[in-house]
Image (cartoon, rainbow, N blue to C red):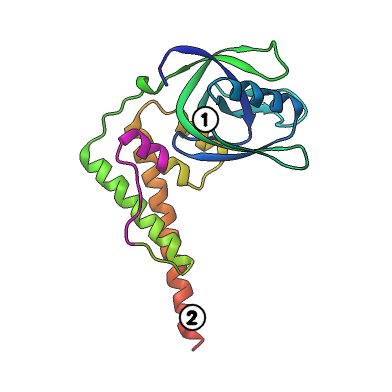
Amino acid sequence: MTSETRRLPLFPLHTVLFPGATIPLQVFEERYKEMMKVCLESDGRFGVVLIKDGKEVGGSAIPHDIGTIARVLTVNESSMDRLHITAIGEERFQILEIIEDKPFITALVVADEKSQKHEVPIHELKLARETVSKHVSYLLSMRGGWINNTYAPTDPLRLSYFLAQILQVDMNERQRLLAMDSCESRLTTCRAQIDKESSKLALSAKIEMTLKFSRQ
């Protein structure tokens, strides 16, 4: 994708999609089935935007100005006349103008990842990757699992989105993280929050282990 302005169909949702993450969608409204038809006849891309005001189904929705360009990976049609779609987030965009000349929303958008500050100190990247590894290990240990190596993107920008994706926060906070213009700020914010979550998981695991042995 380039940073040129383009017209993009929008899918307003009560969720935030980060670049690099996948999203499953069930499309049943006629307007969005038409939208998907238009997408698939083009390059298979549409915009996922968090709803600021309004509903996903049945009415109009006002989206946030920052969203993520999604590319369709798979499409399956069910017997209930629904489209089951899997898409992947590619890059962030900013809405320049909403256009309402179709049953679904479209907008003039510009991919704006190049406007973000990508410079991140090496030690911060190291800490971020260690945070991912530790957090995933805690999650797996709580479920009785184990892993030797944890995947984490090497690119600073993708790593910052990866941390934001695994963070357990509400949608408004996820939107705030998506909209951050500094990769380092996103990384440090996510790392601090994930460290807190990991500490809680470690404490829960310790309490569970103590209770387990006390029953023996």
Residue extending farthest to the bottom is 216
Residue 71, disc? 1
Locate the N terminus by quadrant.
top left
Q: Position of residue 118 (x, y in %)?
A: 30, 28
Cα–Cα gap, marks 2 and 1: 47 Å
* Figure quadrant of residue 161: top left
Point out residue 198 in the picture as x, y percentages from the top left corner.
41, 57
Residue 130, how many percent across, how many down? 30, 51
**Circle 1: element type:** strand
- What residue occupies the far left of the structure in this picture? 122
Number of other residues with Cα within 10 Å of mark 2, as a class: few under 14, some 14 to 19, many 20 or more: few
Give coordinates of residue 13: x percent, y percent. Answer: 63, 32
Image: 106 above or below 14: above
> Quadrant of residue 30 in the image?
top right
Task: Identify the residue at image location x=63%, y=35%.
Answer: 14
Q: Amino acid at mark 2?
A: Lys
**Left or right, 130 with reference to 18:** left
Horizontally, residue 51 falls left or right of residue 175, namely: right
Q: Magenta residues?
A: 148-162
Specify the amino acid type for callout 1. Arg
Report the mark closest to the observer, 2 or 1. Answer: 1
Nearer to us in this view, 16 or 205 = 16
Give whichever of 104, 96 is nearer the camera.
104
Q: Earlier in the sequence, mark 2 or mark 1?
A: 1
Q: Are the two marked residues, 2 and 1, in contact with CB atoms closer than 8 angstroms?
A: no
Give neighbour class at mark 1: few <14, some 14-19, many 20+ (Cα, 10 Å): many
Residue 212: assigned label: 2
Of the pair 186 and 84, the residue shown nearer to us: 84
Residue visible at 70% across and 31% down?
56
